[in-house]
Structures are given as structure tokens and as C-alpha cells.
Amino acid sequence: MKTNPMNKACRDYRGAMLDALEDRLDAESTVSFEAHLADCSGCEAEYASLNQTLRLLDHDVRPAGTDTSMIDLRRRVRVALAEDEPRRSLPMRPAWGLAAVLLLIALFWWGGPEPVHEGEKMLAQVEQAGRASLDGGLDSSPALLEQVLAEDFPLDDNLDDMIDELSSVELEALSLRLAALTVPGTERDPS
Amino acid sequence: MNKPVHDEHELIRRFLKGESWAFDALMSAHEQQAYRLALGMLGDPDTAQDITQEAFIKAFRSLRGFQFRSSFRTWLHRIVVNLCISSLRKQKRHGMLRLGDFVHGLRSQTGQPARELDRKELADRIDAAVATLPPKQRAVFLMRHRECLSYSEIAATMERSEGGVRANYFQALQKLKKELDPHEDEPDE
């Protein structure tokens, strides 16, 4: 067996050495490669030592991540991605929505010495003339409201048309006031 | 080979539609391998966990731009490797890595053939040897040897030619041979 310095043939066979180490050479190339090893101690030694290194490295079994650590990893990724989702707009949040309605009602109620809208007059009339608890608001006692409105604000159209002229804030306030209205002598008998 | 990729692309589409089970499926399919790759690159379990987390977040966040030309694994591994290389550079800048000393220390402690070492010592020694590889070569070695990825997949991950990756892997094996062979320090001829 010759101990040649690396020549062109050796360099070519070094190219095939990786395939040989991984057992990926075809039959013809394997025969040719083995023939070269038999003739070249340098390549044979290199092949043998690399093979030994690979076998040694095969003993290196990596510990996998524990189930707990992987669950924690998944949780943290999920949380980070959830933070990317667009935040809901403030008016959509119930607490803010309620606060905004109350603020508007307060502004509407204390907004000025004189009613600036006919709806405000209507509200005052309803409060003064109420004779019953209108638990559900407008829908529960439309006849009473109609009667009150008719006294000071003669209606040519029906109640629905009248209500249509009220703003949503006014309707909200009207509904709240009607719901809270309890007049002595007209309370419902609990029995 | 194509079937899993097709299924994986379907999973990505489902994830983008907001189906949360697809998130779990993608995570469970890749989390262990991504973590092992990061651990092999960095050597520290906590840092590896952080890098894996960051890689998944980056991958999921940019899924809307996914072109469906590669596999999710290739894409994820590319992110993991890049993050690891970046982390290693930072550590190096801060003087936290003294791998040569570490390897030398291990050798002087043992001073005995590798076959006599128990598994833990052997694993430590291999880790130390792998840690001496340049980061990109280390990534190629880990993906090929530990994760058994094909050269074409590693080439896609590293954005290099397949031939370049093969040469890189062969060089890594030669370096590891020198690091692990107790007689390698002696003159060859």
C-alpha cells in the first residue's frame, strides 16, 4: 500500500468520501472507492477516522425539550400572538359605553336653563303627568305617553312619528325616566 | 415527501383563517426540532427556549407573507439559525464565550479515550467539540447529523448551494474528528 501525498485522484475520492461515509454511493462508485482505499493509505486512514468520529457522534443523543417546557413555549407564543390582535375600540367596551351614555344624559339634562329641543319638553311633560310605573319604558305604556303628549303637544300624526323625531339620546333618557317613574296611588299590587 | 408539505401548507392556510387548532398542529410538528437545533447551536437550555419562542413568534407573525414555495420547517429553521448566530455574536462581543478554554478544560480533566467516558461525559465532550465549529458550519452539522435533514433542505434553509452545504458538512466532520480524537494533536506524518 502506498502512502502518497494527496494527489488529484485522492482529491476526487475525498469528494466521494462523504457519500461513502453515509452509505450513499452506488455500487459502481463503491467498488472504485474501495479500490482506491486499498491503494492509498492516506485516504484509508482518513476514511477510517471519519467513520469512527461519526460513530462516536451517533452516541450523542440530544435531550428533547420536556413536555412542560414545550407546553410553556406554546403558551408564550400564543400569548405573544394574541397581543397582536387589534384592540377593540373603546366604545365597544361595556363599561366605557355605559359611562359615555351616562355622560351624555347628564350633559343633556344639565345642558342649559331652557330646553333647546322639543324632545326635552316632552320629557318634562311625561315626568309631570306620569301616573304609573312604566317598567319597560315606552313599549310598556305607549298609551299613557300618547295621552300626555296629546295634552300639550297636539299630534296630527301617530306616536311613532313623534318618537321618530327624538334623537337616540333623548329616547334613551326618556326610556330611563319612564322606567323609573312611580306615582303614588298607581303602584302595581305585588299580589 | 410532497404530501406532508402539501398538508403543512394547508395547515398554514387554516392558521391564517384563524383556526387555532392549526397553530397547535404547526407547533407540535416543529417545536422539538427547533428547540434541539437552538440548543445545539447555543448550548444553554434557557437561551435555546427563548430563541425558539422568538423564532416561532417571528414565523407566525410573518405567515401572511409566506409564499408557499418552501416548507414551514425550512423557513422556521432559517429563522432559528439566524437568531442563534445573532445571539452568538452578541455573546462573543460581551466576552461570554471562551470555547477553546472550555474544550481544553474538558480534555485535561478527562485525559482518557472517549470510549471509556460515560454517556454524560461523552455528550459534554461532543457538545464542546461542536461548539468550536463556526456558527454556520455548526448549523449545517446539527441539521444534517442530529436532525437528519436532506442536503437540499439544509441548502434551502441556509440559502446556499447543495454542494456548498455538503462541503461544509464534510469540513465540520473533519474538525470534529480533530477535536474528539485525543491523538489528533500529535503530528500526522
Image (tube, coloured by chain):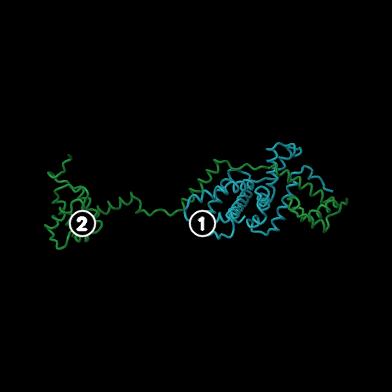
Chain colours: A green, B cyan
Q: Would you say the residues marked 1 and 2 are in contact, meaning their CB atoms lie under 8 Å apart?
A: no
Dot 2 corresponds to which residue? A112
Q: Is residue A39 left or right of residue B137?
A: right
Disc 2: host chain: A
Q: Residues within 10 Å of mark 1 (few under 14, many from 20)?
A: some
Give x and y (percent) for residue A63: 63, 41
Viewer-proximal residue among B122 and B156 = B156
Q: Is residue A126 left or right of residue B140?
A: left
Give x and y (percent) for residue B23: 51, 50
Q: Is residue B152 left or right of residue A129?
A: right
Residue displayed at 30% across by 53% down: A100
Q: Are marks 1 and 2 on the same chain?
A: no
Disc 1 from disc 2: Cα separation? 58 Å
Three-letter amino acid code at the position of disc 1:
Arg
For the C terminus of chain A, the image quarter is: top left
Disc 1: host chain: B
Tell me the number on the disc at residue A57.
none
Q: Residues within 10 Å of mark 2 (few under 14, many from 20)?
A: few
Give x and y (percent) for residue A83: 46, 51
Residue displayed at 71% across by 51% down: B172
Q: Of helix, strand and loop, which one carries label 1?
A: helix
Q: Of helix, strand and loop, which one carries label 2?
A: loop
Residue displayed at 76% across by 39% down: B113
Q: Nearer the viewer, mark 1 or mark 2?
A: 1
Of all residues, the one furthest to the bottom in this rendering is A156
Viewer-proximal residue among A58 and A175 = A58
Dot 1 corresponds to which residue? B13
Give x and y (percent) for residue A10: 82, 56
